[in-house]
Image (tube, rainbow, N blue to C red):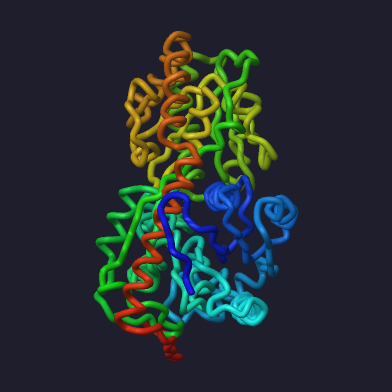
Amino acid sequence: MLHDYRPRGMTRLRILFVTPYVPSPLRVRPYHLIRQLSQRGHRVTVAGLCTPEEEQAVAALRAECERVETLPLSWSRALWNCIRQRPAGMPLQALYTHSAAMQRLLQDELRAAAVDNGRQAPYDLVHIEHLRAARLGLVAHNLPCVYDAVDCISRLLEHAATRAASRMVRCAARFDLNRTRRFEAWLLGQFDCTLTASEADKQALVELAAPPGQRMRGIPAMHSGAAGVPAIAVLPNGVDLAYFQPSDAPREPATLVFVGRMSYHANVTAILWFVHDVLPLIWAQRPDTQLLIVGSHPVRAVRQLGRRYGPRVAVTGYVPDTRPFLARATVSVSPLLYAVGMQNKILEAMAMGTPVVATPPGCAALHVQPGTDLLVAEGAAHFAAQVVRLLDDAALRRGLAEEGRRYVQDDHDWHAVGTQLEDIYCEAAARFRARTTVAGPPLASRSEDGTC
């Protein structure tokens, strides 16, 4: 039996949270959603894949939820997944994190819990994180299921196919684009609710929505979608405001910072453009300016920036805590030439009271007031001018720092996001009840020829 869901003061739920990686402070969104659910009294079990570098994060995650079950996923195994299953017509994002062992673990978990507890359903709801875990989550056929797509990956690939700095990334995006469009469209009919972090990504998925009844061959169908209409909700990202706080330490006079995973193609494209096209214009007026590039796994092109322009450009690689770098910087730059979703790098800088200069794609998902909460610039000359303006104007920096922090407090507190998520769970359960009452429990069907 399902609990009687209520938007406020709702019954404590047992939630199975399925992820393709280990949620951690570096995997901000799922980590803080789990924390919020646990703090509200819900019992969360996380089932996720774990790469060798994520093993240390498992202990921290166990402190935030009831149970954590992980299975290893090596890079060699991920590569073999893509090679072995490539004819299936599914996107690489769905292939390389596929794990038959994890599917068996989830099936065994559901079966064992049902026997142990004597209940028809061992969990009240399944929450599936990201497109990479979507196939894993399809084993839960008789429960309300919420799928957090986070971003529209097709939309990201459309941008990357023409704008990524790396030719290899452009080619890979073109190769995978149509596969991803078909897969994302099909996924919308498999879950009781799909989440995105931004309105633009929601609209992109709406436009992709597949006709009712369309099948994705090679994997089981889960739900046909309530009334054939996919439910898509926007759940914004938040910021841990107790963790990201302004520092009393003095800031360095002309230090810029860019924070982000430096193997991610959008970040690589952004920082290469900034260093090659924008930074020389800044140096022409403020030769004392230095740039900190802070983030894990910098690709070769990024590492070369440090060697070529050092010491005025420093590439840190992985750091356990980005706050000291945000605290010392005069300005945080977000020169993204393309982006999807909501940029936590901007929100965290604003929460730290670090003034931000961003391109329109970087802040498109935020309801900010340009000139009040942050500065927005388009094109190299304009971006450089806005940075120099901030470096030269202490009063403007103070104003942006105060208003930026206030914006994050008002619009991106994880506590408010947690309340929204509870409401979404309530709505997903209602859709599940309506669907199963009218049509009966969904049956899995399977086709083996591996085409769309």
Q: Position of residue 57 (x, y in %)?
A: 70, 52
Of residues 290 and 72, the one drawn nearer to the viewer in this rendering:
72
Please state if 33 lies on the left or on the right of 207 as rendered. Answer: right
Using the rendered view, name the quadrant where residue 231 is placed. Answer: bottom left
Which residue is at 48% across, 76% downward?
138
Specify the quadrant that holds the C terminus. bottom left
Which residue is at 67% across, 68% downward?
73
Question: How many dots with numbers?
Answer: 0
Which residue is at 45% across, 59% downward?
148
Please state if 211 lies on the left or on the right of 201 as rendered. Answer: left
Q: Position of residue 428 (x, y in %)?
A: 39, 64
Question: Relative to residue 437, is residue 239 depicted above or below?
Answer: above
Of residues 178 and 399, the one drawn nearer to the viewer in this rendering:
399
Q: Position of residue 314 (x, y in %)?
A: 63, 31
Please indicate, yes or no, whether residue 92 appears anywhere in the rendered image.
no
Q: Position of residue 91 (x, y in %)?
A: 44, 70
Of residues 191 and 314, the one drawn nearer to the viewer in this rendering:
191
Please state if 449 lies on the left or on the right of 36 as rendered. Answer: left
Please indicate, yes or no, whether residue 11 appears anywhere in the rendered image.
yes
Please state if 148 lies on the left or on the right of 254 as rendered. Answer: left
